[in-house]
């Protein structure tokens, strides 16, 4: 599948007044449902599943998971059946309903059972036909897909920004920066509390960490948690740029970028690339917070 993810300059008086150049890599435009980094993370996992003649993708996520929806749609597109284990009691919401529409079989499991994903997989019948994909799509193959983002770049940048959940995307980008011998610094914004573990995750994938800067103070209370200043920022950003972001991932990372520019963290003339990792369907569960 050919993908389209342009690099675009964002013209904004704030960036102009600070004399920095901010660009977006529009991974959100890759696909409406296999969005952003989730496409990149699935790519080589799906190839492996095809080579191993697996019939079914089995994966895991929370009730608003961008990864579950991406896997459901990718399964439908590339002729795999899909099973999604969902954390917590049975509920219905727009994201899960779209998963079902793409043919995913949902299995709700308690938070306790959810902890041991491999055990859940092992308990399945016909598991020889099944292909295991971890929560969030995290795997070494996923980092290979994310690395390609760097190979695609048409320009050079002093800084790259991205949000992190598992750190897989950041690991791939760090590998790409190193393989291309770039001096680019990678700024990673964990969206969970105590995000220091992201560096260990990146190292586990054998990606270099020497050009990585973790910014740990932009989690706003934890995963999918928000604060009024984050909501206010997302509102202002969306209406002053016409670019949609959401508060779980891209909103937090974009807030961090804004805050660091505000504090004159970057020298004048810096060229900064923000990876729009997509995931806009997550907004469906957050819209009431914007009232
Ligand atoms: C899943 C997701 C991330 C986190 O990616 P990791 O590779 O798990 O760090 C970031 N942004 C969006 C929009 C996502 O959906």
Image: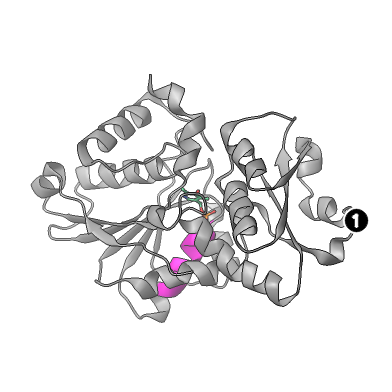
Is residue 106 among the parts visible in the rendering? yes
Q: Is residue 126 left or right of residue 215?
A: right
- The part of the image, by quadrant, that contains residue 237 is top left
Name the residue furthest top: 291
Give the colouring mode of the picture. Answer: one colour
Q: Is residue 169 magenta?
A: yes
Q: Position of residue 258 (x, y in %)?
A: 26, 43
The residue positioned 24% from the left and 34% from the top of the image is: 239
How dense is the environment of label 1, judged by Cα within 10 Å: few (below 14), some, or many (20 and up)?
few
Q: Is residue 72 left or right of residue 246?
A: right
| Mark 1 vs ligand 1: CB below 8 Å | no
Q: Position of residue 48 (x, y in %)?
A: 67, 73
- The part of the image, by quadrant, that contains residue 98 is top right
- In the foreground, 35 or 103: 103
Q: Is residue 138 left or right of residue 26?
A: right
Circle 1 residue: 125
Is residue 210 among the parts visible in the rendering? no
Residue 21 vertical placement versus 176 (above, below): above
Q: Is residue 246 magenta?
A: no
The residue positioned 45% from the left and 22% from the top of the image is: 288
Query: Is the stretch drawn in magenta largely helix, strand or loop?
Result: helix
The residue positioned 76% from the left and 64% from the top of the image is: 55
- In the foreground, 102 or 126: 102
- The part of the image, by quadrant, that contains residue 54 is bottom right
Residue interval drawn in magenta? 167-176
Q: Position of residue 59 (x, y in %)?
A: 70, 53
The residue positioned 27% from the left and 42% from the top of the image is: 259
Quadrant the C terminus occupies: top left
Q: Secondary structure at mark 1?
A: loop
């Amino acid at each position: 599948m050919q993908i389209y993810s342009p690099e675009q300059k964002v013209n904004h008086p704030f960036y102009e007044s600070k004399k920095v150049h901010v660009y977006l890599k529009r991974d959100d435009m890759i696909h409406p449902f296999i969005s952003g980094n989730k496409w990149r993370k699935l790519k080589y996992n799906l190839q492996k599943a095809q080579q191993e003649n697996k019939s079914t993708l089995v994966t895991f996520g929370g009730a608003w998971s961008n990864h579950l929806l991406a896997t459901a749609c990718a399964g439908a597109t590339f002729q795999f059946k899909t099973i999604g284990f969902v954390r917590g009691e049975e509920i219905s919401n727009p994201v899960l309903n779209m998963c079902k529409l793409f043919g995913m079989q949902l299995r709700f499991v308690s938070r306790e059972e959810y902890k041991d994903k491999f055990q859940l997989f092992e308990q399945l019948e016909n598991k020889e036909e099944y292909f295991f994909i971890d929560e969030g799509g995290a795997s070494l193959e996923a980092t290979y897909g994310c690395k390609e983002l760097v190979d695609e770049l048409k320009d050079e940048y002093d800084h790259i920004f991205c949000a992190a959940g598992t750190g897989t995307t950041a690991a791939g980008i760090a590998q790409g920066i190193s393989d291309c011998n770039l001096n680019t610094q990678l700024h990673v914004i964990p969206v969970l509390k105590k995000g220091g573990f992201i560096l260990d995750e990146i190292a586990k994938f054998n990606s270099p960490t020497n050009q990585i800067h973790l910014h740990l103070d932009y989690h706003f209370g934890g995963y999918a948690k928000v604060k009024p200043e984050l909501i206010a920022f997302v509102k202002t950003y969306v209406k002053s740029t016409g670019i949609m972001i959401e508060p779980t991932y891209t909103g937090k990372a974009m807030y961090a970028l804004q805050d660091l520019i505000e504090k004159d963290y970057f020298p004048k003339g810096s060229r900064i690339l923000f990876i729009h990792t997509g995931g806009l369907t997550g907004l469906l569960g957050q819209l009431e917070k914007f009232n």
